[in-house]
Every structure is written in C-alpha cells, then in structure tokens.
C-alpha cells in the first residue's frame, strides 16, 4: 500500500486549489466529503436545470480503495448515500459494481469538485497541476439534458 | 455446510471474519447470518469476488 500518498492526500488542504480557481469562471464548487462523490455532485445538480456526464475512469481514486470495495469492505454510509441519491444517478451498463460503490463512498479526504466554464477547464487544470495539487482531473461535463441527472459512463 | 454467525456485527467485521475463514481453507458451502443491510451487501460482494 502506498501509505505516503494516502497520507499526503488526507493531509492536503483545499487552500491552494481554492485560491487557484479564483482566477477562473467558476459557477459552483463543493468539497467531496461524507455524501461521497456522487452525493455531493447530486447536491449541485438538483434544482440546477442541467445534467452532468461523468467519465468514471477519469475520477481520481486510490487503487487500494477499488480493491477493498471489490472485496466488500464498504461502509454502511456508502449504501445510505446511494439510497439517498440514486434517483439522480444513471450508470452505464458497463460500469463495474466496485466503481459504483467507490463513487458513493463517504471515505474521502474532502477534495474540491469545481464547475468551471468549459473553455477554461484545461487552463484551470494546468494551473492546478502547476500549483502541485494532487491528481487534479477533468472528470466530466455539464449537459443540457437529461435535466438534473448524473450520467456515469 | 459451515455457518458463520455475524449477528450484531457492524459493516467491515462480517467480511473480515469471512476472509479469515477463507484464509484457513475455502469451504464447500458457507452460510453467513447478518442482521443489517450493509453487511448483507458486503458479504455478497466478498463471496462474488
């Protein structure tokens, strides 16, 4: 297990990322904590009038988390998160169970999920990389339809 | 058939007990009794794994 990287992820504050995004056209932002990635994303999508398409392979996940999820080491909170928000989430048929489980998993270290103007996304990504932010990634896009749904591909 | 009583155990423990059992040798059949939904889901995932 890569303890050093796990420790680094948990000890990283959002200060640098938050300061970096201030130079960009950010329309929404949340920190991913106990409701899991999809739970917090659902909070952004509900009543927004738009939908979101997520490329699950692009979402940064610790390799060990996937191994443990596959083994059934999933906290009860992940199932509660799923029950709470599953009506807003549609998984493509080929998304494995372990990926679905980690995307609802409450075991996160509070990284930021930022909605930014599409034409600025790659510049923001580059700025985050330049700041040394751990594993920043473009994980999806806002779409006009289906409204208020998260499509996970 | 071997039986594992996991009543009263919270989420990771039924899976860890099952893992311990499998490390000693894979039983031909096992019955696991749990009393909460998360444990049921987790044990099912472990056995499919």
Image (cartoon, rainbow, N blue to C red):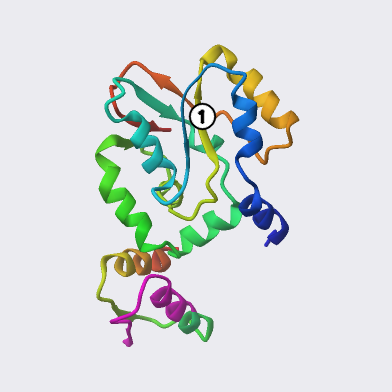
Q: How crowded is mark 1: few (under 14 residues within 10 Å), some or many (20 or more)?
A: some
Quadrant in which residue A138 is drawn: top right
Q: Does the magenta stretch include residue A80?
A: no
Q: Does the magenta stretch include residue B2?
A: yes
Chain ID at mark 1: A
Residue A150 x %, y %: 35, 31
Residue A31 shows in this picture = yes
Instruction: Identify the secondary structure beneath mark 1.
Output: strand
Magenta span of residues: B1-19
Q: Which residue is painted at 30% across and 55% down in the image?
A: A80
Q: Mark 1 points at which residue?
A: A114
The answer to whether B23 is drawn above or below residue A88 in the figure is: below
Quadrant in which residue A134 is drawn: top right
Residue A41 x %, y %: 40, 36
The answer to whether A57 is drawn above or below residue A97 in the figure is: above
Residue A92 shows in this picture = no
Residue A83 x %, y %: 26, 50
In-front residue for pair A76/B18: A76
Q: In this view, does A37 lie to the left or right of A128?
A: left
Q: Which residue is painted at 67% across and 62% down in the image?
A: A1
Q: Which residue is painted at 49% across and 32% down in the image?
A: A55
């Amino acid at each position: 297990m890569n303890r050093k990287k796990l420790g680094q992820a948990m000890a990283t504050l959002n200060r640098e990322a938050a300061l970096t995004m201030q130079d960009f056209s950010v329309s929404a932002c949340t920190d991913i904590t106990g409701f899991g990635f999809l739970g917090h994303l659902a909070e952004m999508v509900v009543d927004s009038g738009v939908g979101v398409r997520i490329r699950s392979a692009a979402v940064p996940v610790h390799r060990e988390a996937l191994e443990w999820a596959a083994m059934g080491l999933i906290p009860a909170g992940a199932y509660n998160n799923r029950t709470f928000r599953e009506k807003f989430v549609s998984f493509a048929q080929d998304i494995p169970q372990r990926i679905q489980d980690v995307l609802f998993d409450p075991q996160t270290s509070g990284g930021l999920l930022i909605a930014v103007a599409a034409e600025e996304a790659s510049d923001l990504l580059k700025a985050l990389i330049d700041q040394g932010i751990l594993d920043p990634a473009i994980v999806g896009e806002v779409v006009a339809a289906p409204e208020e749904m998260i499509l996970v591909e | 058939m071997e039986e594992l009583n996991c009543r009263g155990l919270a989420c990771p423990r039924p899976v860890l007990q099952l893992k311990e059992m499998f490390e000693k040798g894979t039983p031909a059949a096992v019955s696991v009794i749990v009393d909460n939904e998360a444990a049921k889901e987790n044990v099912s995932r472990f056995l499919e794994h």
